[in-house]
Image (cartoon, rainbow, N blue to C red):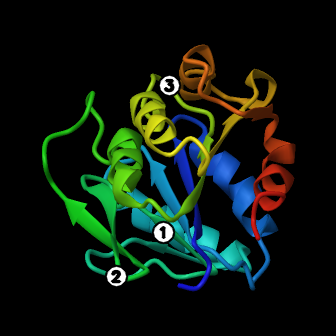
């Protein structure tokens, strides 16, 4: 992967609707991959990926263990599995595991974010969309401390959230760079994509 950037999206309650609005806006030639953790049970994540793939220009799929994260593709963590990434020789490889849930969640946004601690040469654009609870805050805090110049953090504004939990938690922790409504998330992400 020539472009050392990636987008990581974490969401829960209201997420499918938000993703259905956001993902179709990305162009087919998007030069980076998108990793998505949506709190959802097994089977439903596969159905969500298939539905989003049909309406999007980019390819949307349920993530598979060991596959490379490539540009123009969005990977949704399968329900019941944590999704993490390893960075080997310039390639991002997706790993799935069934280790214990984090704060009741598997997949966990925190687990995905924490796996990026080793991705030193990557610029990471993180997005926390609508959702209950605080998943994502701890992991985002850790990667922002480790790579302050390389992490951009975007949170969905309360006005467009179904549940203003996950974004609110990160905003209150003072680790968010931009707070925007859902309709502005795409353009906010793209202004950082090179």
Lower sequence index among marks 3 and 1:
1
Task: Return the residue found at the far left.
Answer: 99
Q: Nearer the viewer, residue 174 or 84?
A: 174
Q: Secondary structure at mark 2?
A: loop
Q: Residue at x 14, y 41 (%)?
A: 100
Quadrant in which the C terminus is drawn: bottom right
As drawn, is 138 to the left or to the right of 65? right
Asked whether the residues under the numbered discs 3 and 2 touch, taking CB atoms below 8 Å apart as contact, a structural biologist would say no
Alpha carbon separation for disc pair 3 and 1: 22 Å
Q: Position of residue 90 (x, y in %)?
A: 43, 80
Asked whether the residues under the numbered discs 3 and 1 touch, taking CB atoms below 8 Å apart as contact, a structural biologist would say no
Seen in the picture, residue 127 relative to 88 is either above or below; the reply is above
The residue under label 3 is 132
Q: Nearer the viewer, mark 3 or mark 1?
A: 1
Q: Position of residue 45 (x, y in %)?
A: 42, 60
Q: Residue at x 80, y 23 (%)?
A: 159
Lower sequence index among marks 1 and 2:
2
For residue 75, the mark is 1
Q: Position of residue 91 (x, y in %)?
A: 41, 81
């Amino acid at each position: 992967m020539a472009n050392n950037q990636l987008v990581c999206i974490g969401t829960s309650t209201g997420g499918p609707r938000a993703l259905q609005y956001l993902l179709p806006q990305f162009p087919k030639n998007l030069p980076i991959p998108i990793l998505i953790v949506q709190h959802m049970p097994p089977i439903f994540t596969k159905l969500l990926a298939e539905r989003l793939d049909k309406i999007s220009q980019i390819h949307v799929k349920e993530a598979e263990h060991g596959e490379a994260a490539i540009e123009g593709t969005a990977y949704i963590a399968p329900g019941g599995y944590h999704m993490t990434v390893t960075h080997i020789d310039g390639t991002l490889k997706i790993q799935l595991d069934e280790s214990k849930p984090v704060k009741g969640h598997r997949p966990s946004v925190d687990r995905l974010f924490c796996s990026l601690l080793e991705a030193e040469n990557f610029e990471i654009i993180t997005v926390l969309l609508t959702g209950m609870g605080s998943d994502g805050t701890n992991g985002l805090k850790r990667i922002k401390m480790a790579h302050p110049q390389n992490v951009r953090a975007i949170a969905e504004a309360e006005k467009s959230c179904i549940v203003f939990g996950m974004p609110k938690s990160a905003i209150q922790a003072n680790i968010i760079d931009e707070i925007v409504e859902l309709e502005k998330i795409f353009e906010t992400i793209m202004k950082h994509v090179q």
